[in-house]
Amino acid sequence: MVKIAILGFGTVGSGVAEVLKMNASSIAKRAGQEIDVKYILDIRDFPGSPFESLVIHDFEIIEKDPEVSLVVETIGGAKLAYEFTRRALLAGKSVVTSNKELVATHGVELLSIAAEKNVSYLFEASVGGGIPILRPLTNCLAGNEIMEIRGILNGTTNYILTRMFRAGLSFEDALAEAQALGYAEANPSADVDGIDAGRKTCILADLAYGYEVCPDQIAPIGIRSISAADVAGAEACGRVIRLIGRVLRREDGRVHLIVAPHLVSNTCPLACVEDVFNAIMVTGNAVDETMFYGRGAGKLPTASAVVGDVVDIVRNLPARRALSWVKAPADYVADNAELIYSFFIRAKADAAAAKAAFGDVTIISEEDGICVFLTPAMETAKAESCAKALDVLSFIRVLN
Amino acid sequence: MVKIAILGFGTVGSGVAEVLKMNASSIAKRAGQEIDVKYILDIRDFPGSPFESLVIHDFEIIEKDPEVSLVVETIGGAKLAYEFTRRALLAGKSVVTSNKELVATHGVELLSIAAEKNVSYLFEASVGGGIPILRPLTNCLAGNEIMEIRGILNGTTNYILTRMFRAGLSFEDALAEAQALGYAEANPSADVDGIDAGRKTCILADLAYGYEVCPDQIAPIGIRSISAADVAGAEACGRVIRLIGRVLRREDGRVHLIVAPHLVSNTCPLACVEDVFNAIMVTGNAVDETMFYGRGAGKLPTASAVVGDVVDIVRNLPARRALSWVKAPADYVADNAELIYSFFIRAKADAAAAKAAFGDVTIISEEDGICVFLTPAMETAKAESCAKALDVLSFIRVLN
């Protein structure tokens, strides 16, 4: 029997305890032995909870208990979670987490400590919630050079965008609805401003290419500015709008990372991803296009991914599951001004002015002095300079 | 350096050699050492091929070469492939294959020999071609009870159905087109009659529940009878038709396996899967719905999955990757007459007769003496007996 501890008894942590209990027998069968939760660390008590008796408040008890060989960190954030993860790894315990912020910001250090101590640090749940994506990316697709990754990585923004398209809601109303349903927080910035998607995009790039990209190297563009007019314009050209986290490999070995709203063709599988679902499309030079779809958040789906990592570690003990990436060369992340896109533009202009500014454009509509059009594919920097000639209301990338 | 042999230098076998060469450096990095193809076994010679010098015609050379620790079987079929796989495993060599027929029919025996000899027998490529599905199912989703699997598992039939819907082609014309494009064989029976999808459905059930289901326990229903009128009727109720391989777990622990055309709602992600692409939707009691999408066939995509297995084995040497399932209890596979469905029916009847026969039906259309309707959800056996009261032209399951 393997004894584990859960740090943080919030949504995900309690989900992990629940899944381990609900599916105990099949999990034991797959892991090769029973998995027993010995401690649950939280600042709160949980009177009446079936797990009440396991709750403790002092991490040192876990750290010093040689019987605990694996720790599940579901505290979140990069402060206490960072300290406890470090100390657990240094104490020779494997750690499994759903904490994208911690992995994206301190992954290099924590993975190197894990290697040094010959234990595992796994985080399948940190990207795409319950969707198996990190293991397939590093394992099943190991025969490929990864050419590109495009992901719908944030369920809250995908719900908002879906409602704007399906129900004609404004951004504000769709956000309010998402908050009422508990999909969005009172302060929705991490979601709607693309910060959460940015962290996940970094983790995907780290694993795909072995070089660290820090969240502060991305300037995410969120969805606050998406208007009903943008929705109408996208529909008029057979597309939807999705917040896409994109990792693109260049010929010169450098990479582009971008998080921004993109127009996505209705014929692209990513356009079928609605509501709070997530999907990650990975393109390899042998497998071509693959896509992984499912619930990107939520108590049990996220717990499913955490427990999958726990089972993987236990089944393979004493061997460790090795993931790693290293600090990248200074100029590894390329300037997105060089990224080539066709752009969806709404501007106070007529078709002639649009053509004059951008050349061979495709006019979607022209009325009330506002022209909606698609530009030819061009470098982002060039598109931005061309846009100066017009009074631009919307400037959105089109995913080819 | 690990030395391997490839058995059968056809489409997949040559793709494996190509991928190992094309991505040699990144593969070596991920595998922890170089992977070198020492022999290629085929009855043919390949003058002019870059691999010409590796071609041999006698399996015994591979069997008796202690330097060869891993064999890739891409011969296909269950005769020679069966003999060579058995002998390779008995000789203490791990085997990786894309051979769904062999795995579905002899998996129990071959996996037990692999266990006995402490080597691996992996076959990610046998289901969904390049799509990572078997490893996620057995590994990433290990925390779940698998409730249901629904897959578009055959690219040829999906291409035909896509063309019938998108271009209005008849089944015959779409098949001819698929044959002209090399997607379908001169004798298309294995594809269009659901035999290939049936084998893959068995492998998914074997891995999901640990009990063997043999292809001869499924009576697959193919797509030959799908007509333009069915396509029109499906479109009229917001659905498409897909050949679905379905594994459904019952309360009593038994399972239903069915391979048949199903109407799929346009809002279901499976409906977005077009042309030769495959997708497998797995529902777990923790993760809820996940879907895995990509190319289900083709030289490099299939090779990608094979090479992924090869890398997984090499990276983890000397440990073996253990998969297994056992013979099932006699009554393990339940009678699909008990499966509950709503049915799409076209019959020479009027709405009144349809109602009289099936009760509370939903009429889709009624013209020229033909009524198209959806029945309420009912046991298949009951629907079949109700259908006797009408002159039924089409009887197709509706995926809920």
Image (tube, coloured by chain):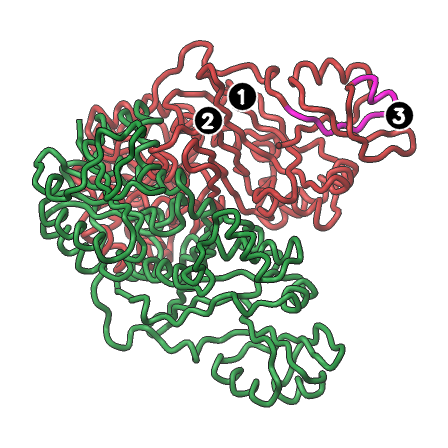
Chain colours: A red, B green
Q: Nearer the viewer, residue A5 or A19?
A: A19
Are the residues under badges 3 and 1 in a single subunit?
yes
Q: Secondary structure at mark 2?
A: helix
Quarter of the image holding residue A71?
top left
Residue labelled with disc 3: A350
Tell me the CA gap for discs 2 and 3: 40 Å
First along the sequence among labels 2 and 1: 2
| Badge 2: residue crowd in 10 Å (few <14, some 14–19, many ≥20) | many
| Percent coordinates x, y for residue B327 in the rendering | 21, 67
Residue at the spot of label 1: A218
Residue contact at pointers 2 and 1, CB within 8 angstroms: yes
The residue that appears at 25% across and 57% down in the rendered structure is B78
* Residue at x 34% of width, y 32% of height: B19
Q: Is residue A11 visible?
A: no
Amino acid bearing label 2: Cys
Q: Is residue B85 left or right of residue B395?
A: left
Q: Is residue A276 left or right of residue A67?
A: right
- Which mark sits nearer the N-terminus, 2 or 3? 2
Q: Callout 3: helix, strand or loop?
A: loop
Q: Position of residue B166 (x, y in %)?
A: 65, 53
Asked if both marks, 2 and 1, belong to the same chain, the answer given is yes
Which of the image's four quarters has the C terminus of chain B? bottom right
Q: Secondary structure at mark 1?
A: loop
The residue at which mark 2 appears reads as A202
Label 2 vs label 1: CA separation?
Answer: 8 Å
Q: Position of residue A84 (x, y in %)?
A: 31, 31
**Quadrant assignment for the N terminus of chain B:** top left
